[in-house]
Image (cartoon, rainbow, N blue to C red):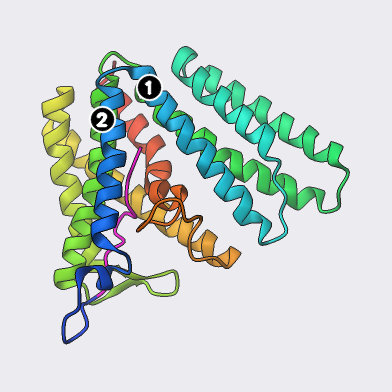
Amino acid sequence: MPTTHAGAEPAAAPSGGGSPAGRAGRNLPVAIAIGLVLGAMVLGSIYTYKPAFVGVVALFMLLGAWELVQALKVRLLHVPYAPLAAGGLATLLLAYLRGSEAMVVATLLTAVALTLWRVAEDLPGLLPDLAASLFALAYVPFLMGIAVLLLVPADGPDRVATFVATVVCSDVGGYVAGVLFGKHPMAPTISPKKTWEGFVGSTVACAGAGAAFLPLLLDGKVWQGVVFGVAVVCAAVLGDLGESLLKRDIGIKDMGTLLPGHGGVLDRIDALLITAPVAWLLLTAFVPS
């Protein structure tokens, strides 16, 4: 379930030019290549064998949870990875096989397992560790489980494609508008490269994408697509800013180094995580299965 940092466009280009990669703060050709590979994994799985998509999400969940656990250690917060990973896998599987209620039950049982595991370790710092563990559970496995819920209906592949493509359009629109027009930083202390001009570009791109995808893929209405696109871009930008705040508080630049040009898995899917519940709620309301 690939995405890019929603609205993570560079600020105004410095006088004298510079390569697109330099302005973006990342190796753009490598970033594009990685994005295409991840996109192919998602599209190939949802349109050939739906359970394969669950496997792709599970892989990202395991890697993303590991990155978060390791990052939290920088602040001396200990999150037990074993119960988080096992419970996360159960959450994704039950979301696909039994739906939202079973997913919620699996999440609650995982929270209990994390608590008991951490208590049994008998180490100092119990309360901060429990808070970090519950945050990790909610941020990675639970939100990924909601993305899996999008796949469950008969038209699930089209729902997932609409969701992912609209979030990607947020990043592309923000990047292009930021390169061409970006002058006013949106949140300079959190993410200096985001600009209001880029946000406008993201909004226009997402509204257009929603207006196209909902009628074409899901028999929705154009106005529903516009509402969907605007909601997606707001959630995507909040997701990206939220992860930036988290990394700033921890004191790290990236969550990992697995994906060249992007950082870690969580750096790649941060916008998708926060956008997943918004997409699921709106698509369920606009296009009942």
The span picked out in magenta is 1-11
Residue at which label 1 appears = 52
Q: Nearer the viewer, residue 202 or 226?
A: 202
Q: Taking 95 as reference, is 58 above or below it? A: below
Where is residue 261 drawn, in percent x and y? 35, 58
Kindly identify which numbered label has been placed on residue 276. Answer: none
Residue at image position (27%, 73%) is: 22
Residue 213 figure quarter: top left
Is 147 left, or right, of 285 in this rendering?
A: right
Q: Is most of the magenta stretch helix, strand or loop? A: loop
Name which residue type carries label 1: Ala
Q: Nearer the viewer, residue 171 or 67?
A: 67
Task: Count residues near mark 2 (Cα–Cα under 10 Å), then give few for <14, some for 14-19, many for 20+.
Answer: some
Residue at image position (48%, 21%) is: 95
Residue 27 figure quarter: bottom left
Secondary structure of the residue carrying numbered label 1: helix
Kindly identify which numbered label has been placed on residue 43. Answer: 2
Q: Quadrant of the N terminus?
A: top left
Residue at image position (14%, 22%) is: 219
